[in-house]
Amino acid sequence: MAVTQGNKVISSEHPNVESVNFNDLTWTNIIKPTQLEMDYLAKNFPFHPLDLDDCLSRMQRPKIDEYKEYLFFIFHYSIYNRETRVSTHDQVAVFIGDKYLVTIHSGGLESLVKFFRECQIDEEVRKESFSQGSGFLLYHILDRTIDAYFPILDKILSLTEEMEDMVFDENVEAAQELATLRRDIITQRRIMFPSRAIVADLENKLKRFTKTDISVYYGDLMDHFNKICETLDEMREIIEVYKDTDFILGTDRLNRVMRVLTIISTIMLPLIVLSGLWSMNIPLPFGADPGGHPYFFYFIVAALLIVVFAMLYAFRRKRWI
């Protein structure tokens, strides 16, 4: 049996179940859920068993399930790894009814954990967040979650701006950095776009759980989501341009190197033929036999230089160099 101490539910059987209430609205928060917590919810709330199973699954896509007494939905949030500079995602499962709100997550969403603690210790925060119903409380949770995402977005924008200098710097290999940033942007889009769709559907479905008009508030949330998604789209296009630019510049640098090497090889070929011709062990005009001409060496050098300059002149006329 659970024992309530203040706003916290303490039990040896259900140690991860906490709650905070104001008037007739209760917010229950579960961090790192196990089957014990799901059994607790099954006994105390009218939740469908399949929804409770989804709370323990880490492979669920964002979704909304609507029932007569409550809504169940799952949304994802981004966790940015500063070392790898690639984001991962985690999920929050939410049950919302007329008199209750239940959040189930791993504890990685710091804005949600912090807001719950504020509601526990600060009566003014509880009064502001709880007074207009569970739908309005959910708005505050989502609002803080989306606000916490903007520093991640700013970091990606900063990396995108730095990437431009790297692409045009011949001394820097930007391909690996571009691939890392491109991968992170794709991950962010995979997280934020489905979440935006979930929030768009929530507005009409939550009207029965609020005491005030929430269209303005959820409209503000949608503005934030739209801004984020549009920014991610823009950054994806920029990274694609940088990727193509890096490929073009890299190909151009390679072509310049290959052009120089080809010219050197082409010039050396007739020189090798001429020098090899007079090195044969047979009598030749101006050959290297004991009776040969004393200026034979200078003649060979002059012949080689004439060939070199003639080929350079021909390459220049054809604008190959």
Image: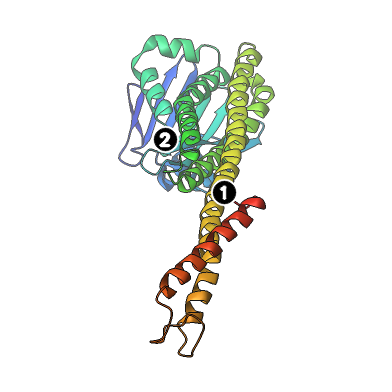
- Res 295 seen here: yes
Judge left or right: residue 210 versus residue 143.
Answer: right
Judge left or right: residue 207 versus residue 122.
Answer: right
- Name which quarter of the figure residue 96 lies in: top right
Q: Position of residue 170 (x, y in %)?
A: 46, 43
Q: Which residue is mark 2?
A: 30
Q: Nearer the viewer, residue 253 or 57?
A: 253
Q: Is residue 60 above or below residue 210?
A: below
* Numbered mark located on residue 21 in the image: none
Q: Position of residue 260 (x, y in %)?
A: 52, 56
Query: Tag 1 or tag 2, which sits nearer the N-term?
Result: 2
Q: Nearer the viewer, residue 89 or 115?
A: 89
Judge left or right: residue 151 versus residue 262.
Answer: left
Q: Nearer the viewer, residue 192 or 199?
A: 192
Q: Quadrant of the N terminus?
A: top left
As helix, strand or loop, the secondary structure at mark 1 comes to helix
The structure residue drawn at horizontal position 43% and vertical position 19%, both measured from the top left corner, is: 21
Q: Amino acid at mark 1?
A: Asp
Q: Nearer the viewer, residue 70 or 114?
A: 114
Q: Is residue 26 above or below residue 187?
A: above
